[in-house]
Image: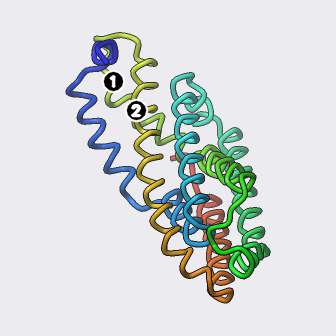
Amino acid sequence: MTAMMTLLNPEFFATYLVAACIVIAAPGPDSMNTLAIGMARGSREGVAYAVGVGIGCLTHTLWAVLGISAIVAASETLFGVVKWVGVAYLLWLGVQSLRDRRGLHAAGEAGATARTSSGVSDRVLQGVLTNALNPKVMLFFMAFLPQFTDPRLGAVGAQMFVMGLAFAVITTAAYALLGAGAGRVGERLLRKPSIAQRLNRATGVLFIALALRLMLAERA
């Protein structure tokens, strides 16, 4: 803790934490996905997705520290590649959710709380990829983190990494609570197959809508 406070300007870091909490609390694609997955798949998968989003935030921190985000921001081609890979992935998730009937089976056979370990690990990976493949999030970290560094202390990259790590931890905790809460509500609703099907469809529509939103994203 002492080493961290030596590395960071306490006043700047306190201001950063307040700003980070405000950003995380604001509704956005990741929070909407966490809510939808918790409702449609239960608490475990909602929390798993939240963990994946936190890991995704950490990857954006590393890109910002290493200067990769700046390279992507400067290149229309690289920005486009990341964007369209993200669009394709979100569209694929949307179609999968629209076609997926596991929620109906879970509701009718083993109950809405039945989840496999593979499903949880898949959901973590899904959270990582949906966050990491969003170039707008990449640009946000590149612009956001440096504002709270103190060049007088040196090791600006290390300061950015610590702040990004804090952002990832707060994000994971906040979204895990959101996913768990949505899951508790969803698990009651999933006892009715017709509602389970509607939740699956709503999740699929959400992913497709986010793909269209990302499709319109520009570097500026």
Q: Dot 2, how many residues are within 10 Å of its Cα: few (below 14), some (14-19), or many (20+)? A: many
Q: Position of residue 172 (x, y in %)?
A: 47, 46
Q: Dot 1, how many residues are within 10 Å of its Cα: few (below 14), some (14-19), or many (20+)? A: many
Seen from the viewer's position, the closer of residues 125 and 212 is: 125
Residue 162 lies left or right of residue 128; in this view the side is left
Q: Which residue is pictured at 72% across the width and 70% down the height?
A: 97
Q: Which residue is mark 2?
A: 145
- Evaluate if marks 2 and 1 touch, with contact meaning CB atoms under 8 Å apart: yes
Tag shown at residue 83:
none
Q: Position of residue 56 (x, y in %)?
A: 58, 42
Q: Which residue is pictured at 39% across the width and 21% down the height?
A: 159
Q: Which residue lies most toward the front here?
A: 110
Q: Give the image quarter of residue 27.
A: bottom left
- Check disc 2 and report its element: helix, strand or loop: helix
Q: Which residue is pictured at 55% across the width and 62% down the height?
A: 43
Q: Which residue is pictured at 68% across the width and 72% down the height?
A: 204
Inspect the image, locate mark 2, and give the three-letter code of the amino acid beneath it.
Answer: Leu
Q: CA distance from mark 2 to mark 1?
A: 7 Å
Q: Position of residue 137 (x, y in %)?
A: 52, 45
Seen from the viewer's position, the closer of residues 189 and 139 is: 189
Inspect the image, locate mark 1, and give the three-letter code of the amino acid beneath it.
Answer: Thr
Coloration mode: rainbow
Q: Which residue is mark 1?
A: 149
- Check disc 1 and report its element: helix, strand or loop: loop
Q: Give the image quarter of residue 158.
A: top left
Relative to 129, is 144 above or below?
above
